[in-house]
Amino acid sequence: MTALRFGILGTGRMAGAFAADVGALEPAGIVIAAVGSRHTGSAREFAARHDIARAYGSYEELAADPDIDVAYVATPHSCHEAHARLCLESGKHVLCEKPFALNAAQADRMIECARRHGKFLMEALWTRFLPAMRAAHRLLEDGALGRIRLVVGGGAFVPPANPDHYLRQPALGGGALLDAGVYLVSLVSAILGAPLEVKSAGIIGPSGVDDQDVWLSEHAHGAQAVCYLSLLTRRAPDLEIMGEAGRMILHPPLFCPTRLTLSRPGEPDKVLDYPLAHGGYAYQALEVRRCVNLGRLESDCLPLAETRAVMATMDGIRAQIGLRYPGE
């Protein structure tokens, strides 16, 4: 079997986590063949740290490498559209880090570009592919909770006070919603479908990005979800799904759960553990390999239409709290 060769755009925290986890998948037919950065020095240092053969001092050089099959875009949020399209137009499949883009209009252009060039494209929302999350979906599909009525979830963390931190930068698409709230919007979408209506409130901080968000979404068949995200306090992120026949807790951390608790009337609680067989970021790379090997241009586990709908939901939340990014 020919190995699927990844190239990484970016050398930040996400890129490092991806390289560490996916770098162990060579026996599974996945290799990281190159890394690209705006600076040759940082690319070479990253390549040496993660045992990557080639390092490029520009994203254009990596996109032009004929030995790369898939580009993993791990640059700042505001760069996702440009860098994904660069790679798609260069003949690469693309796995683009969450959030997929700044807004739905950018997502539309990315999806159109992928279809025009006949290339695979998927958002790197790793949580959707983890064993615990897949198990939760199977339980819901099997009717373990009956009709779902309410989903409640959220979390809070305080980033470094440094004003140059990426979460404080409007030009980089910073703030709570796009960076962390995307998990909640995406997971609720997977459980209840796209919302029919969203009502939100938030706090725009001194840096001009959202420091705190709360939203209520109305879904088909009378289901509702209540979610929150804060950069002003601390609480481990979790999610509770409540149905007419029981409830399910996805234990913290919500972005990488390994434990579920299933509670149903008249039965003892079931605590279900799903340890990771690979590093958490590996599962999305394995999904890319599966889809590419099957000749698919998108994942049926995270379709592009759903990714686009999640972006539109976050557009609506931002519009209600008055958050616009430069250039929008």
Image (spheres, rainbow, N blue to C red):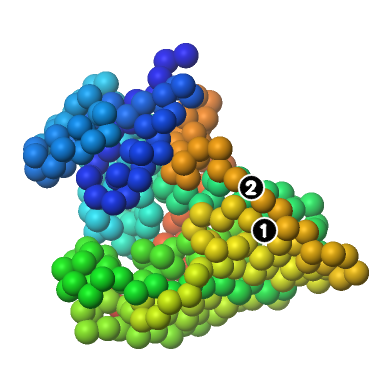
- Where 46 falls versus 128 (above or below)? above
Instruction: Give coordinates of residue 153: x percent, y percent.
Output: 56, 72
Instruction: Give coordinates of residue 111: x percent, y percent.
Output: 38, 46
User: What is the three-letter code of the residue carrying label 1?
Assistant: Leu
User: Which of the pair 291/45 is nearer the observer?
Assistant: 45
Q: Residue furthest top?
A: 1
Q: Which residue is rendered at x = 47% and y = 30% of the image? A: 289
Q: Which of marks 2 and 1 is nearer the N terminus?
A: 1
Q: Which residue is rendered at x = 32% and y = 29% of the image? A: 32
User: Which of the pair 246/149 is nearer the observer?
Assistant: 246
In the image, 313: left or right of 66? right
- At label 2, counting other C-alpha atoms closer than 10 Å, the crowd grade (few under 14, some 14-19, many 20 or more) is some
Q: Quadrant of residue 76?
A: bottom left
User: Which of the pair 112/321 is nearer the observer?
Assistant: 321
Instruction: Give coordinates of residue 167: x percent, y percent.
Output: 27, 68
Q: Which residue is rendered at x = 35% and y = 45% of the image? A: 17
Q: Residue furthest right?
A: 266
Can the viewer see residue 312? no
Instruction: Give coordinates of residue 138: x percent, y percent.
Output: 71, 49
Look at the numbered discs 2 and 1 and tell me whether their residues touch, using CB distance below 8 Å.
yes
In the image, 148: left or right of 214? right
What is the distance, in whole Å, between disc 2 and disc 1 at their CAs? 8 Å
In the image, 152: left or right of 80? right
Q: Which mark is residue 260?
A: 1
Q: Which mark is residue 274?
A: 2
- Where 92 falls versus 126 (above or below)? above
Q: Which residue is rendered at x = 33% and y = 57% of the image? A: 101
User: Which of the pair 250/286 is nearer the observer?
Assistant: 250
